[in-house]
Amino acid sequence: MKEDKIKILFVCLGNICRSPAAEGAFQSLIHKENLSDFFLIDSAGTAGYHDGELADPRTREVAKARNINLTHISRKFIKQDFQRFDYILVMDHNNFKTVRSLVTDESHNRKIHFFRSFEDGQFKNAEVPDPYYGDLKAFENVQNIVESASVGFLKFLKSEHQISSNH
Ligand code: 4NP
């Protein structure tokens, strides 16, 4: 086990749809690449509406179809997360605003990124759309986005932290 893990927190509003999906997609990707030991991963929501709950059944169903088993229990984002994590990946502008409003030290600001800014293509500051009031297709769309953004994010991290797949 590596001591100096790279600590990543995925953040959305309710922590039952987008951020657990992102957490699961990224976990699955690093597991496939045999890089799990390099990372500590978690997710949280800016609202505590669903504290203590598993991810939404639709999020879990769509992930399960891709062989991803989501076991995360929803929790609210707290200020201490700025100390505990190196990268805070937000899903939309609303999450970004809320997380920014909790910053107490200027150094925290550079930890906050839009998850889709790492997706290949021109998605700078693009959002992962909230699927909560949508149909299963909206959840499939989220799953596709978080998988594609995970690939781009891992590529960035490998380069930034000199990690190779055959470490
Ligand atoms: P999430 O989706 O932020 O992707 O987890 C939502 C989950 C719950 C609610 C809104 C968005 N809600 O209003 O309860």
Image (cartoon, rainbow, N blue to C red):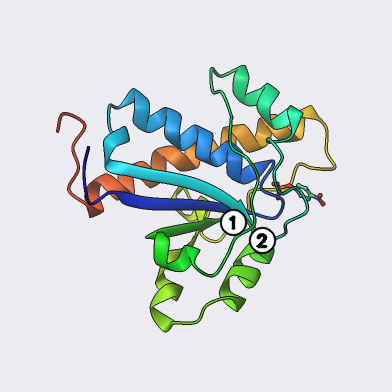
Residue 52: which quarter of the image? Answer: top right
In depth, the one of 157 and 6 nearer the eye is 6
> Who comes first in sequence, dot 2 or dot 1?
2
Question: Which residue bears the numbered disc 2?
Answer: 46
Determine if residue 122 is in view.
no
* Disc nearest the viewer among 2 and 1: 2
Helix, strand or loop status at disc 2: loop
In the picture as drawn, the residue positioned furthest to the front comes out as: 52
Q: What amino acid is at disc 1?
A: Ala
Identify the residue at image location x=52%, y=77%: 103
Question: Which residue bears the numbered disc 1?
Answer: 126
Check whether the beta carbons of the residues at disc 2 and disc 1 lie within 8 A of each other. no
* Whole-percent x, y for residue 62 in the image: 66, 24
* Whole-percent x, y for residue 40 in the image: 37, 45
Identify the residue at image location x=41%, y=67%: 83
Residue 33: which quarter of the image? Answer: top left
Identify the residue at image location x=17%, y=48%: 162
Position of 167 compared to 109: left or right?
A: left
Q: What amino acid is at disc 2?
A: Thr
Determine if residue 138 is in view.
yes
Position of 82 compared to 145: left or right?
A: left
* Whole-percent x, y for residue 102 in the image: 58, 75
Residue 55: which quarter of the image? Answer: top right
* Whole-percent x, y for residue 137 in the image: 76, 29
- For the residues labelled 2 and 1, the Cα–Cα distance comes to 18 Å
Instruction: Count neighbours of disc 2 (C-alpha within 10 A) and say few if under 14, some if 14 to 19, many if 20 or more.
Output: many
Helix, strand or loop status at disc 1: loop
* Disc number for residue 33: none
Identify the residue at image location x=69%, y=65%: 94
